[in-house]
């Protein structure tokens, strides 16, 4: 056995082993005190990169869940508003049925009409003032996009159509209804000549018992080549409102356009079909004439033209607003159904996001978090090795003294 004084190899080995043991002890203490297996990049560089990416995903998923909950709150706000609209419409419908009671006096009808108008005004108020987070949501121009994922493009878009009017002309609804005597009128010649000047030839289409809100229908029967007609409405019992319909032979099926004094859109041939004129309150200036050659102006109700594919039957028809209200209620129910489906979609998204977040968190935990059982076991081992290394180092440091015995 070689014996050296200047170089103590045994002591150097013991010191190295003790240094490694001290490092392992320090790492175990750090992991146990922080609860993290990776406290710096040198602990596990690959694991750090993977866990960092997972952390970004988890935080994104957490915010996406909050976004989806905001979407649910938005939808519930809109649904609550639509519920109140439906309540008001149900009341208007009830008033409409009550108004069509033969024992009602004119004052009774007026009282019912006032309440109906108030309910309709409330519907418009709800449409114009319902807000979420400071934004109007039922005025027809609201659109919100919710990011419901951890990455860009994972969106759910919410759009609300305008509630005011509900796609129906309910403003100024006359709950008493309208009596219309409708029949088929044959136009023997164009009412407006090629030069654009109206002729004196007119035809009586129908008569009503009063100019109220409603749809006035009549049938057209004429030569297919004719394209200019004059619709005359008896407004006051003395004066007639002349409304020229240009290219009436090409009225589009289902069209709902505002009639001025001259035109309605182009489309299908309406021969033998039904055309309606809808009256609603307003201040539109229409051409009023004692005869078709003598126009004058008068502020009356605005007129919306409609076209129906079903021929109008002759006789007296009660035009009740109940059907319009039923249509509005149907649309409200459809909107609420769509909102309910969208809310369920958000809830499903939240469940999916929560599941993804849970599993990604579990995977990250296996990479990042300290396994206390394993780390405690290593700590105990390192402490024993440390004590052994210290003991061995102490003995190794005594070896150079053996050389003194050779000099004695």
Image (cartoon, grey):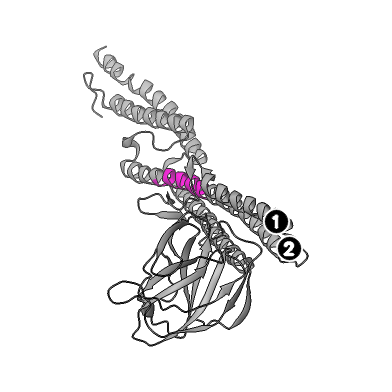
- In depth, the one of 327 and 229 nearer the eye is 229
- In depth, the one of 293 and 222 nearer the eye is 293
Q: Residue furthest right?
A: 103
Q: Residue furthest top?
A: 408
Q: Is residue 44 visible?
A: yes
Q: Position of residue 286 (x, y in %)?
A: 43, 60
Residue displayed at 34% across by 18% down: 398
Q: Which residues are magenta?
A: 57-71
Callout 2–callout 1 Cβ contact below 8 Å: yes
Question: Within the magenta stretch, is there residue 37?
Answer: no
Q: How many marks?
A: 2
Crowding at dot 1, Cα within 10 Å, few <14 / some 14-19 / many 20+, comes out as: many
Residue of label 1: 112
Label 2, label 1: how many angstroms apart (C-alpha)? 8 Å
Q: Position of residue 323 (x, y in %)?
A: 61, 69
SS state under label 1: helix
Say whether residue 335 is left or right of residue 406.
right
* Disc assigned to residue 98: 2
* Disc assigned to residue 354: none
Q: Position of residue 3 (x, y in %)?
A: 24, 24
| Above or below: residue 273 compared with residue 112 | below
Question: Which one is earlier in the sequence, the residue at label 2 or at label 1?
Answer: 2
């Amino acid at each position: 056995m070689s014996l050296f004084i200047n170089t103590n190899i045994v002591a150097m080995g013991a010191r190295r082993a003790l240094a490694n043991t001290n490092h392992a002890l320090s790492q175990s203490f750090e992991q146990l005190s922080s609860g993290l297996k990776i406290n710096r990049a040198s602990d596990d560089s690959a694991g750090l990169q993977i866990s960092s990416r997972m952390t970004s995903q988890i935080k994104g998923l957490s915010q996406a869940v909050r976004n989806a909950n905001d979407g649910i709150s938005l939808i519930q706000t809109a649904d609550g508003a639509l519920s109140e609209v439906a309540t008001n419409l149900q009341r208007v419908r009830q008033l409409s049925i009550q108004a069509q009671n033969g024992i009602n006096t004119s004052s009774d009808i007026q009282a019912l009409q006032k309440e109906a108008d108030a309910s309709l005004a409330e519907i418009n108020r709800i449409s114009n003032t319902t807000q979420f987070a400071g934004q109007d949501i039922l005025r027809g121009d609201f659109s919100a996009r919710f990011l419901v994922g951890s990455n860009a493009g994972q969106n759910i878009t919410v759009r609300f159509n305008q509630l005011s009017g509900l796609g129906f002309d309910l403003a100024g609804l006359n709950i008493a209804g309208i009596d219309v005597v409708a029949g088929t009128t044959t136009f023997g010649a164009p009412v407006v000549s090629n030069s654009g000047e109206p002729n004196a030839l007119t035809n009586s289409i129908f008569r009503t018992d009063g100019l109220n809100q409603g749809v006035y229908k009549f049938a057209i029967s004429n030569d297919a080549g004719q394209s200019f007609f004059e619709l005359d409405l008896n407004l006051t019992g003395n004066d007639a409102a002349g409304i020229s319909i240009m290219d009436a032979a090409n009225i589009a099926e289902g069209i709902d356009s505002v009639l001025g004094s001259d035109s309605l859109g182009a489309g299908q041939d309406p021969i033998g079909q039904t055309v309606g004129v809808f009256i609603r309150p307003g201040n539109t200036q229409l051409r009023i004439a004692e005869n078709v050659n003598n126009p004058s102006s008068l502020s009356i109700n605005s007129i919306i033209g409609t076209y129906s594919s079903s021929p109008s039957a002759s006789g007296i028809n009660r035009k009740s607003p109940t059907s319009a209200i039923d249509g509005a209620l149907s649309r409200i129910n459809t909107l609420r159904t769509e909102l309910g489906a969208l809310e369920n979609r958000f809830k499903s998204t939240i469940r999916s996001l929560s599941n993804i977040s849970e599993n990604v968190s579990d995977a990250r935990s296996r990479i990042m978090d300290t396994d206390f059982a394993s780390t405690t076991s290593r700590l105990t081992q390192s402490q024993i090795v440390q004590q052994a290394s210290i003991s061995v180092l102490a003995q190794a440091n005594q070896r150079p003294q053996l050389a003194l015995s050779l000099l004695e």
